[in-house]
Image (cartoon, rainbow, N blue to C red):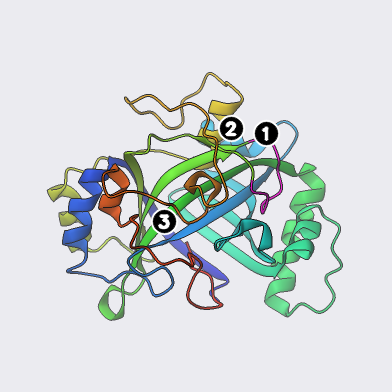
Amino acid sequence: MIRRFNRFELKYILPVAQCARLIEDLKHHIPADSHGGEAGYPLVSLYYDSPQLDCFWAKIEGIRFRRKVRLRIYPGDYISQVSRGSIEIKQRINKTVQKRRLELPLDRAEALCAGMLSLEGLDEMDTQVANEVTYLSRSMDLQPSAITAYWRRAFEGQEENAGVRITFDTYVASRIHALTVNAPAKNRLILPADYCIMEVKCDDRVPEWVISLLARHDCQLNRVSKYCAGVALLRDFKVMPLALSPGVPLTLEPLEGDPSNGLSPSVSTAEPSAALGLSVSAPTSSGPSSSEPPHG
């Protein structure tokens, strides 16, 4: 598993139909990633913040150096049965994003984020990450703050396009209650179901063909944070980190398997997200195809 990397990230908020056309062009350059394939996979992340929400406000205020800690899982058909999680420190320095990652059994990952895990038995690199999480947890009094859940399709470059990763996130939802990452709890959409967040991620520079692709499909950059959007909406803060013209739907009432839980969506081909591959033809098991989680 890739445990450390630096990269540039560009984000866009686009209608699903526009993303579907872009994906058809994108397939001529890079393939779907090996973990989610054409159907994609669900992600659920638990974000930690200080009682004063320092991480939230650092993003809103545009602080150039900032860090946040999250615990991420890749649920299959039954989110409550997930037993492992990836702790990530996401750090931004100006325009560069740095990530450090550590995978642990879920109970140990939760203990580490609470600053209460013994670090015995970890290798040197994992120990460094664990020490940093422990420091941040104790110095900032980190606490579970919000959960985001969404369905992701990812495309990843190989050979001459190595380091290029482009992702499409739909059914983007959040909650600030039931802050256990593998709880099958109710979430609220923070993005209309017919919109998508596209992220372009590159290790060194954005290739010319990517720039051309974005221009051809009239993609306009957005400063967007799923975490901040969820917190702002659900706490009714008068900030708008995710600015859209369409309205945001009312709270969903998801069942086990509802996409707002971060689980495998049951989507009819008549719905907008079917254009992104979220159809009844998707595999029954929505988890990654190997033990290594997708990295991004």
Pick the residue in front: 132 or 258.
Answer: 258
Q: Label 3: state its secondary structure.
A: strand
190 left or right of 201 in image: right
Residue 165 x/y as whole percent:
36, 64
Badge 3 is on which residue? 152
25 left or right of 160 in image: left
Q: Residue at x 32, y 39 (%)?
A: 194
Q: Residue at x 53, y 27 (%)?
A: 233
Mark 1 Cα-neighbour bin, 10 Å: few <14, some 14–19, many ≥20 = some
* Mark carried by residue 85: none
Q: Is residue 123 magenta?
A: no
Q: Quadrant of the N terminus?
A: bottom right
- Tell me the mark number nearer the camera, choosing from 3 and 1: 3
Mark 2 Cα-neighbour bin, 10 Å: few <14, some 14–19, many ≥20 = many
What amino acid does circle 3 point to?
Arg
Q: Residue at x 57, y 53 (%)?
A: 44
Numbered circles on residues, count: 3
Residue 261 x/y as whole percent:
55, 47
287 left or right of 198 in image: right
Can residue 46 be seen in the rendering of this structure? yes
What amino acid does circle 1 point to?
Leu
Badge 1 is on which residue? 53
Badge 2 is on which residue? 231
What amino acid does circle 2 point to?
Val
Q: Specify start and end residues of the magenta stretch as a single range.
A: 176-184
